[in-house]
Image: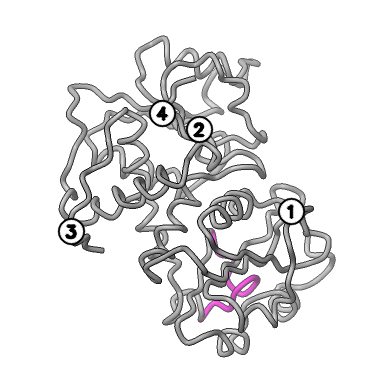
Amino acid sequence: MNKNSLLSMRDLSVEDIYSILDDARLFNCSFKDWQLPMQKALVANLFFEASTRTHFSFESAQYQLGCQVADFAAGASSVTKGETLYDTVKTFESIGYDMVVIRHSQDEYFKELENINIPILNAGDGAGNHPTQCLLDLLTMQNEFGTLEGLNVVICGDILHSRVAASDKEALEKLGSTVRFAGPKEWERPGYPTIDFDEAVEWADVVMMLRIQKERGSGMAGMTDSEYLEKYGLTKERYARMKDKAIVMHPAPVNRGVEIDTDLVEAEKSRIFEQMHNGMLVRKAVIKRGFGFAPFKKEKEVCV
């Protein structure tokens, strides 16, 4: 497999993570107009699951970098005839594509792709990994607090089915943050330390809410939206008890009035739409890295 593929946060050292975050930040200022110095950069986006933010921020990043982009529609492809994921990806490699971005419902689908030679960027697999979402979360936190060391982070909601929770836990702990998890008992995950959410909102520097992953079999155990919000969601009362400088995050899509009060989505402490902007910057950085280009030389002052 190509050494510049990004499949999980385990692929990245601490130095790699910070290099990507630095590049992403520089893409927001002095390198805003930088493009790949290649005559051809042909990229295919293979999304086997529905996506708005991840799909189109990858696409925005690709076009801004000067890539030629093809969007793959599984329903209009030979997948409907029984073609394997490996054969689909091998086809793109064989006909001249230089990189593929893949989202798939299967956990660690990339284990089937070890003989693929072009770089693969993982846009999410099952409940396992979402490295670019993790990186944009890290960038958002680093921009806010100046460091990732010593932060208290609570992630609340459907932990069992969340690839965001998995990737963020792995990276944040590696970088010196303390991560705790909250939500319904039936959605707890082995090895993920829990905390009472009412306690967590006063403890955390970052309150990250997750939606209920209904497409992976999650249900609300007969609760209404308002009952779930009252018991497990970020209400206005809980928001009021957060630290003065704490922030609210969410990987989205947001189910307003379920895991978070609709008025809090764009409240003063919310960084939800900032995360989306940072996602485009991070994806520019990982595409650049995927094509084998070295990190930018870090400038003395990095604008945000």
Camera-side mark, 1 or 3: 3
Disc 3/disc 2 C-alpha distance (Å): 36 Å
Dot 4 alpha-carbon crowd within 10 angstroms: few under 14, some 14 to 19, many 20 or more: some
Q: State the SS at label 1.
A: loop
The answer to which of marks 2 and 4 sits earlier in the sequence is 4
Camera-side mark, 1 or 2: 1
The answer to which of marks 1 and 3 sits earlier in the sequence is 1
* Residue 242: in magenta span: no
Q: State the SS at label 2.
A: strand
Looking at the picture, which amino acid does disc 4 mark? Asn
Disc 1/disc 3 C-alpha distance (Å): 42 Å
Camera-side mark, 3 or 4: 3
Span colored in magenta? 253-263
Q: Is residue 68 above or below residue 267?
A: above
Q: Are marks 2 and 4 in contact (CB under 8 Å)?
A: no
* Residue 258: in magenta span: yes
Residue matched to label 1? 160
The answer to which of marks 3 and 4 sits earlier in the sequence is 4
Asked which quadrant contains residue 225, the reply is bottom right
Residue matched to label 3? 300
The answer to which of marks 4 and 1 sits earlier in the sequence is 4
Q: Is residue 298 left or right of residue 282?
A: left
